[in-house]
Image (cartoon, helix red, strand yellow):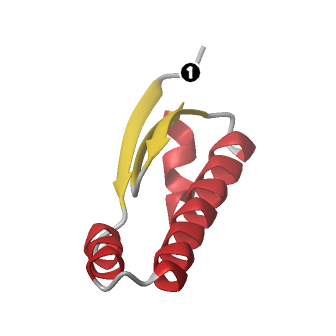
Amino acid sequence: MSNQIFLAYDGDNAGRLVGRAILANDAGALSEVSSRINLGHDVVKKWVQEHNGHVISGGGDEGCFSLPAEAVQDIEEL
């Protein structure tokens, strides 16, 4: 069995954009930011699965996953 590594990600500024949309009572902007966050999670999940990894958690604008150590050489694809 190969060595597994754990990686975490955090969408910079996403929380700030959500906060601004809420304060402005702007449902359209909030929906747009939420859609982009969800798309980001989908992109990460697909890449991780293609590299024989596993998503551990994903919520809000952050997440964590594991993957075989040798897959880290392809991380720039993500």
Q: Amino acid at mark 1?
A: Ser
For the question of whether residue 77 can be seen, the reply is: no
Examine the rendered structure and indicate whether residue 24 appears above or below residue 62.
Answer: below
Q: Position of residue 72 (x, y in %)?
A: 49, 48
Can you say which quadrant of the picture contains the N terminus?
A: top right
Tell me which residue sits at (28%, 81%) in the image. Answer: 20
> Is residue 47 rendered to the left or right of residue 2?
right
> Quarter-wise, where is residue 52 in the image?
top right
> Is residue 55 rendered to the left or right of residue 25?
right
Q: Residue furthest front?
A: 25
Examine the rendered structure and indicate whether residue 76 appears above or below residue 13.
Answer: above
Tell me which residue sits at (36%, 65%) in the image. Answer: 11
Can you say which quadrant of the picture contains the C terminus?
A: bottom right
For the question of whether residue 32 can be seen, the reply is: yes
Q: Residue furthest top?
A: 1
Tell me which residue sits at (49%, 78%) in the image. Answer: 27
Q: Nearer the viewer, residue 51 or 19?
A: 19
Examine the rendered structure and indicate whether residue 29 appears above or below residue 36.
Answer: below
Q: Nearer the viewer, residue 16 or 55?
A: 16
Q: How many marks?
A: 1
The residue labelled by disc 1 is: 2
> Is residue 18 rendered to the left or right of residue 47?
left
> Quarter-wise, where is residue 40 in the image?
bottom right
Helix, strand or loop at mark 1: loop
Tell me which residue sits at (45%, 45%) in the image. Answer: 59
Q: Position of residue 60 (x, y in %)?
A: 41, 52
